[in-house]
Every structure is written in C-alpha cells, then in structure tokens.
Amino acid sequence: MANRLARESSPYLLQHADNPVDWYPWGEEAFAQARKLSRPILLSIGYSACHWCHVMARESFSDPETAALMNDNFINVKVDREERPDVDAIYMAALQTLTGSGGWPLTAVLTPDGEPFFAGTYWPDAPRHGLPDFRTVLRAVIRAWDENPAEVADTARELTGHLRQQATASTRRGALDPKLLTDALEQLQRSFDSKHGGFGTAPKFPPHSVVRLLLGRPEASARNAALTTLRHMARGGIFDQLGGGLARYTVDEAWLVPHFEKMLFDSAQFLGLCASAAVSSGETGFRRAALLGASWLLHDMRTDKGTFRSARSAESDGIEGEFYLWTQAELRKVLEPAGLESVASEAFGASEAGNHEGRNILTLSEDWWQPDAERAARLEQARSLLFEARARRNPPEADDKVLTSWNGLTIENLALAGRLLGEPRLTDAARSAAAAFLPQLDSGTLRHTAGGDTLLLEDVAFLGNGLLGLYQADLDPRHLAGAARAAEIIVTDFSADGSLYSTAEEGEQLLYRPRGLTDSGAPADTAEAARLLLAMSRLSGTERYRELALATLEAAAPHVSRQPTLLGSSLAVIDSCFAPAVDVVFAGAEQDGLRQLTATVQQRYLPHALLLHSSAGSPADWPLLEGRAGEQGSATAWLCVDRSCRLPVSEPAALARQLDELTGAQPS
C-alpha cells in the first residue's frame, strides 16, 4: 500500500511512495503528529540522481524489518533537497557541525520542534567499511530518546543555538578591497593542479564559479588555470563524450571516473564556460564541447513546454554508470563496419583492459582536441554511431521536476553560448524557456517548482540573471523588464536589515532564516542576487540596488580569501566591482546595420560588458539612453567605459576598432 508520498509531485518522493516506511512529506502534519506522540522526527533528505540515496532506499527503506523499527519509534519525513534547498541547507549545516563533513543521503533526527540532535549520511544494511548498520544506529537513537531525554533536549538546544549564531555571524561585514582578490588568486594558484586542472585533489567537483572568475581576469596565470581546468574536464570522463552533459564529480584527480549522475546546473554552467573559452582562446575543442553540451540540454533535458528537467540518475538497471561504459569488443562491433575502429583507441582512449573495472569510460585524447577537418569528420562519425548504439540501452531515469532557479541558469548560459558562438538556435531555446516563466514573474505566481508554494532567492536571482543574459543576446525589452522585476522582488521580499536571505520574509518559518554564502555546484544565491542588483543599478541608476549588493558582498568579504574555491561566485562579483564598467548603447531601427553592429559586440568575450538598446524605454528609466538616438533611423553604437563614451559609430569595423583598443586586441 502506498504511503503519503504518493500524493506528491516530486519524482524523488514518488520513488519512495511504495516503501513500507510510513513517510510524511515535509510539513505541519508531520510535526503535529510528532508532538502528539512525543516521538522524534527521522528526516531523510536526498534527490533522484543520488546513487547512495538509491542504495539506502533498496537496503533499508524497502526492508520490512527496518521500516517497522522506523514506523514504531519515529515520525519519518522524506525531503527532496532540490525541491526544498532551504530545508536542506539548515540540516546540512547541522550535519557538518556534528560530523565535520556533509553529503547525501542526509539522515537527521529532530525533536518535534524541528531541532536536530543527531545526523549522518549513508548507513548500510549490515556493518561494512567501518560503518554500523542502519538498524543499530536507529536503536541507539531510540535508547537515547527514551532513557536520556534531558541530554537529548540539551544537545538539540545547544546545536540549534550554534546554527542560529552561525547564520547571524555570516551577516558580519568586511571591507571590499582589491587585496581580497589578490589574496584569493594567490591561494587559488597554490591549490591549482597544473597537471590535471582544477583545485586540490580527489574527489574533484567542477569549479564553475572559480573558472568564471579566472577566465575574466587579466593575469595570464589566471586565464591559464581556467583554460587548463576546462580543457581537462571537456576531455575527461566527467564529460559525456558521446551525448554531452557533465557528471556531478569525479572520484579521481584526473577527471576520469565520474559519479555518473548529471545535473542541469552543472551542464548549463559548463556550456557557458566552454563557449566563453572557445571565443577567448580560439581552441576548436571548446566549441565542440559547448555544442555537444548544448545538444544534451536541448534533446535530453528539454520538456515539451521548452523548460528543462532537473537531472539524470547515475544508475540504469540498478548499476551505477552502466549506460556509459564500453568494452573494447562493443566499440569494435559498432565502429569496425565503418572502418572507424581505430578512433576508439586513438581518440576515445579505449583499450582491451579498460580504464574502469574492465570497461572503458570514454575520454578525448589531447591529439584529437583540435583535429584537422578529416579527423574531425571521423571523430563525429564515430561519436554519432556510438551514440546511436548506446541509445538502444536502458537509459538512466530522468527527474522531470522543473526548477525555476536551475532553468534561470540554463537560460543565461544558452543565451551566452548562442551569441558568442553565433548559434541562433541556442538563443531561441533560451527564449522559449524564458517565455514559460515571464508570465509567472509578472503576475507574482512564480514558484520554485510548478505547483509548489515556495519561492526562494535563488529562483528570482538566477531567473533575473537569465533574463538579463538573454537580453544581451536578443535586445528584447521584455527580457530586460523581467530582469528589472526580479531585482525589485529581491529587494522587497528577500532583504532585511541590509542583508539578503534565501527565503522570503513572508515564507515558511523554519528553524532559522537561511542565507547562502558558499557555492554548492550552483552559485551562491546571495552572490547571484548581488550580481543582478549591480547590473540593474548600472543600467537603471537605482542606488538602493547597488547599496544592497555591496552590503551582500561585504558580508562575503571576510570569507572569500580564506575559502576561494567555495566562494567563487562572490569573488567573481567582487571582481566586477573593480573592473571597468563597459556599456554599449545601440540606437536606430535599420535592421541589417543594427544586426551587424550588435554582432560585433555579442560575439566577443567581454565579461564585464552590458548592452542596451534605445527600445528599452526612456532615459528616465535607463539613464544611459540620454541623448542616444540614431540619426535618420540609422543604426548607431556608443561604447562607454565608466560612463565616459567614445564617439558614436555606425560601421561595425569602427566599433570593432574601439573594442580592440579597449581589450588590447585579445583574440575574440
């Protein structure tokens, strides 16, 4: 018989609807029942693409004996961390405080008031690898609850007080100073892996925000670190060499053996970074990686409404990575009839012995990173044949949940890649996704998930930046207006006492009001909000946007140089505060000339530039438009740096010369 989760919409919760565990979704019903029965709450947080979440579900949550122990002694609550990142943030902080580390599945035990007193991650169904079995852990918690209630209450109270104090401490501010960037860059260089790219050792997670920071810096060492990291990731097993899409992380330092789940937020950011690297470096391998990654987003992750689903699981047929692994014989069978069998070893690094448990994770060799036309054609033909053969396998399950925040990231990076690479279909895809969210933003019905009742800072900030990024690609005033609406919501609903919070002031009252500071795959919500507010302040002249953004960055300042790999998004926004503000204003209705002028800017890598067209509105709304009008309808552009504008130009070549002078004629 199905439990209460059968009424939920989250694919992850629905995966547990037939467990013998009497699961409750997060909500007042569970807490009221816990108070009524004086039972602790067993909180289990995971997500559908999480391999060890599935393992624990099979071993423990599907086991009648374990379920009976849980049902008789706890009120059991299941949470999809992607659906409720605010809840996850609070109890992940508790786990990290208690154990010094984090991860999923997250298992926490709470008082009926929601105060945690015990937490851990995965426990097996039998003692293994130095871990006790889950039933033994449960019995120990039950004994503590029954025999030492005062001690449990003290632990819960002290831990909750500590968590609230931590949250308050994160609002303390430091001065914004260029030395913050200097110190952070020095620390990043010390931890940089010059052989494999990335920072530190295994396991390695994609450092998207740090790469974004480094790619936009003027120092050759910073740019080299960014390009080296991206190059090794794009050539590694973490990137699906056949279908595109980036895995969550690798267990090794060489980006070879991934934890095979693919998350939308990873692949979206990687797309934008590869497109930026392709333009700034001229390396064709980056363009190939970007277009392959875009293909995965458009063909594998796109819904029939033009929005994007959340993830693909690590498993198929109950085995992690089964969909992606190849024997040499399997590769030969597909490629030999086309005379391409050598591509498997030469380009994709395959061998009889394999590189992972006797089979092959496909990589891309350095010699094939920038192949000539003949080899590029062979590579693409081999990739296509293998992709078609793999499609006949049982694919990993998709999490069809549509998250506003992650869609915002995807909109921004599709638009960025579309304009940098001259690929209108990518911009069209970004526009189609934006069309699904704009009416909700305008009507005040925007939510984190469709049908949900929660709106988070990450939703408004990521979507706002997505719409602003799309405006940079198509100059459609509706998208600029949407970004402006998002900025206003941030200020009115998510700020208090000069600080930004992850949850709305009128939202659900949790143990405390969380606020994001560190990146966790996706960039920190407060940093992305500050980025949007600074951009909109620059365009609109709204000083209160700038004041709140700077206060937010000042709250990050004490931490950025100590933990730069965790605060890359904040560092990138701080970097923009000290970089020259480059604005390009366009006017005129003559379409061909306007397209040529805008393309001159749009297809260059200019990380700190903003574009504005006279169709956006009046100078009262957008002060940069003051005095900017094309003569007799002709297309005209003004390049402005820190509000000082060059002479207007109407020819793309003249605008290109001005941009070359500005950038030092770096490759574009």
Image (cartoon, grey):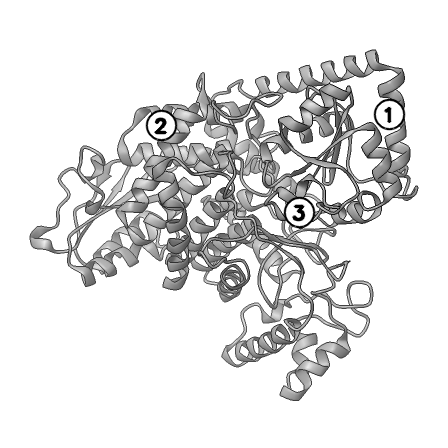
**Label 3 vs 2, first from the N-terminus:** 3
Q: CA distance from mark 2 to mark 1?
A: 50 Å
Q: Is residue 641 visible?
A: yes
Q: Position of residue 203 (x, y in %)?
A: 72, 47
Neighbourhood count class around disc 3 (C-alpha, 10 Å): few under 14, some 14–19, many 20 upward: some
The residue shown at (68%, 39%) is 4
Residue at image coords 74%, 47%: 18
User: Which residue sits at x=57%, y=30%?
Assistant: 561
* Image coordinates for residue 144, horizontal then vertical, percent: 87, 20
Q: Secondary structure at mark 3?
A: helix
Q: Amino acid at mark 1?
A: Ile
**Residue at disc 2, secondary structure:** helix
- Provide residue 275's location: percent of width, then percent of height: 46, 57
Q: Amino acid at mark 2?
A: Tyr
Looking at the picture, tell me which residue is in the foreground, 155 or 114: 114
The percent position of residue 73, horizontal first and vertical second, equals: 83, 28
Looking at marks 1 and 3 on the same chain, the residue that comes earlier in the sequence is marked by: 3
Q: Amino acid at mark 3?
A: Leu
Labels 2 and 1: the sequence-earlier one:
1
Task: Confirm or deny contact between disc 3 and disc 2 (CB under 8 A).
Answer: no
Q: Secondary structure at mark 1?
A: helix
In-image side of 446 versus 482 (left or right)? right
Per the model, the C-alpha gap separating discs 1 and 3 is 28 Å
Check the image and report above or below for 509 versus 108: above
- Find residue 545 and name its label: 2
**412 or 83, which is in the foreground?**
83
Q: Which mark identifies residue 142? A: 1
Instruction: Tell me if label 2 and label 1 are in contact, CB under 8 Å.
Output: no
Q: Which residue is mark 3?
A: 14
Q: Nearer the viewer, mark 3 or mark 2?
A: 3
Return the residue found at the far front. Answer: 1
The number of callouts visible is 3
